[in-house]
Amino acid sequence: MNILNRLFKIGQSEAHAAVNQLEDPIKMTEQGLRDLRQDLDNSLHGLAEVKAMAIRARNESESFRAKGADYENKAVLLLQRAHKGELEAAEADRLAGEALLKKAENEAQAARAATNQTQFEHSAAQLDQNVATLRSTISQWENELKTLKARVTVSTATITINKQMAQLDSSGTVALLERMKEKVAVQEALAESYGEIAQAGKSLDAEIDKALGTAGATKASADLQALKAKLGYHD
């Protein structure tokens, strides 16, 4: 059966892809699902047609049976009229016989229509099972496809990350960081050196200011003593 063959092909898509990289399991599964949906549409169309034929056969059977019963009633009426003297007996018998033949013909057609109805209903039941199987299979493979796509997404991301991690040393990133650390250490040492030079300059100025400050204080003390002597103050 072509459907089973297609399902087998879809089910083996990952194994085929491992052997032949030209085959994409996701694309194969998607194509398989499209084929299954087309089969489902065809089955639904066929099911509708078969059910319509079963309904038509049932209606025909009922119609033929109703006509047969009507011809039987007419035969009865003809005989009753003849019995009452309203119609010649020979004519009544002839017409009643014709009516009964029509009754038999309609009953035979009703029986054939009933047989067709049974066959159509049996075919419709089989198609119903096929439709249910197709729907279940489509739902199953849709879930499988979602899982497969998720696995591909995760594996692709994992491959990318692992590849980047594996190429860190080969790309010279670690060596570059080491060179940057060395450069920063040199700059920091240079900055510290300039700081010590600047501090040394400030210390020299402080010593000079300190020396000048002591001399100024001595001169101020002498001036104070001279002023006191001029005023006649004595310690």
Image (cartoon, helix red, strand yellow):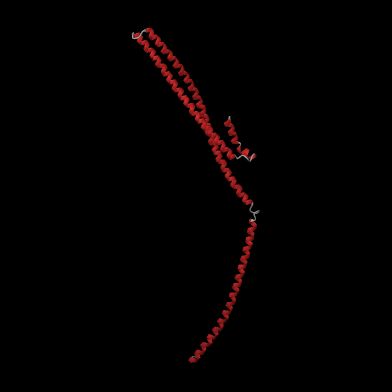
Would residue 235 be visible to someone looking at this image? no
* Residue at 52 percent of width and 87 percent of height: 223
* Residue at 43 percent of width and 18 percent of height: 65
Residue 227 is situated, as x and y percent measured from the top left of the image, at 50, 89
Would residue 183 be visible to someone looking at this image? yes
In the rendered image of this protein, does residue 206 appear above or below residue 14?
Answer: below
Residue 204 is situated, as x and y percent measured from the top left of the image, at 60, 77
Q: Residue furthest right?
A: 170
Q: Quadrant of residue 66?
A: top left
Q: Nearer the viewer, residue 44 or 211?
A: 44
State the count of labels.
Answer: 0
Judge from the rendering whether residue 37 lies leftward or rightward of residue 61; answer left or right. Answer: right
Quadrant where the N terminus lies?
A: top right
In the rendered image of this protein, does residue 30 appear above or below residue 63?
Answer: below
Judge from the rendering whether residue 74 lies leftward or rightward of residue 213; answer left or right. Answer: left
Residue 163 is situated, as x and y percent measured from the top left of the image, at 62, 49
* Residue at 59 percent of width and 46 percent of height: 156
Judge from the rendering whether residue 17 lies leftward or rightward of residue 69; answer left or right. Answer: right
Q: Nearer the viewer, residue 119 or 184?
A: 119
Residue 157 is situated, as x and y percent measured from the top left of the image, at 59, 47
* Residue at 44 percent of width and 21 percent of height: 60
In the rendered image of this protein, does residue 19 appear above or below residue 73?
Answer: below
Q: Nearer the viewer, residue 45 or 210?
A: 45
